[in-house]
């Protein structure tokens, strides 16, 4: 049975069959009829789902412009206040106002520059309630944070979660976005995840 699975995986890797078809074939190999129905899971990198596809908000690609403008504006405002304080020898109270504005502007500008190339996580859950969220996903920062808290959180000690996240980040860097579509017909729930 392992040889058959390897052959299916090699056909998927060679592009002879789709990833979704490969999942179906592997599931058919080891599946015996059971009383409990399992949710339908489809993995796809480029194919459209049979259900309504996840709408990725179009404006998010250009979202980074707005914090960039705000950050640059704060940097300029802080620089003007600092120039006035040090150039005119004004009160030191104004310097206290200028430096935080300048530093906040630099931080917002750096964040906006990062958002320019950041991966976004888009999640839509439909069922009894409908939930749709989108936010930037700092994969490498998340992996670093997990690695730092691992000694203090027992649940992370023996997991390779940070390596999995780094692997996902490297995979997404070289290929198309990741799209996961899970449907549970028994409960009427549908979850779509898009990372790209």
Image (spheres, grey):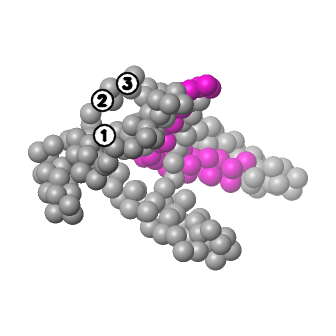
Q: CA distance from mark 2 to mark 1?
A: 8 Å
Dot 2 and dot 1 residues touching (CB under 8 Å): yes
The x and y percentages for residue 23 are 28, 46
Left/right of residue 2 with respect to residue 191 in the rendered view:
left
Left/right of residue 153 with respect to residue 23 in the rendered view:
right
User: Can you say which quadrant of the picture contains the C terminus?
Assistant: top left
Which of 77/117 is in front? 117
**Quarter where residue 125 is shown:** top right
Quickly name the residue at label 1.
44
Q: CA distance from mark 1 to mark 3?
A: 13 Å
Vertical placement of residue 153 versus 96, above or below: below
Tell whether position 52 is magenta: no
Quickly name the residue at label 2.
48
Residue at position x 62%, y 51% in the image: 106
Q: Which residues are magenta?
A: 101-130
Dot 3 and dot 2 residues touching (CB under 8 Å): no
The x and y percentages for residue 3 are 16, 63
- Taking the image as drawn, is residue 180 in sight? no
Quickly name the residue at label 3.
51
């Amino acid at each position: 049975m392992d040889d058959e699975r390897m052959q299916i995986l090699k056909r998927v890797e060679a592009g002879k069959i789709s990833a979704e078809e490969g999942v179906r074939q592997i599931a058919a190999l080891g599946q015996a009829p059971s009383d409990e129905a399992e949710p339908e899971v489809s993995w796809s990198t480029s194919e459209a789902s049979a259900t309504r596809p996840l709408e990725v908000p179009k404006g998010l690609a250009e979202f980074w412009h707005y914090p960039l403008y705000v950050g640059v504006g704060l940097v300029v405002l802080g620089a003007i206040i600092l120039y006035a304080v040090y150039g005119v020898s004004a009160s030191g109270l104004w310097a206290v106002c200028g430096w935080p504005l300048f530093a906040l502007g630099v931080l917002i500008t750096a964040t906006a520059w990062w958002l320019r190339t950041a991966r976004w996580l888009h999640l839509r859950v439909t069922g009894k309630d409908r939930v749709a969220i989108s936010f930037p996903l700092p994969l490498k920062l998340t992996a670093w944070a997990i690695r730092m808290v691992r000694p203090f959180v027992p649940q992370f000690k023996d997991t390779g979660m940070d390596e999995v996240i780094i692997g996902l980040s490297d995979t997404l860097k070289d290929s198309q976005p990741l799209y996961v579509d899970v449907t549970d017909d028994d409960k009427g729930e549908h979850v779509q995840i898009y990372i790209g």
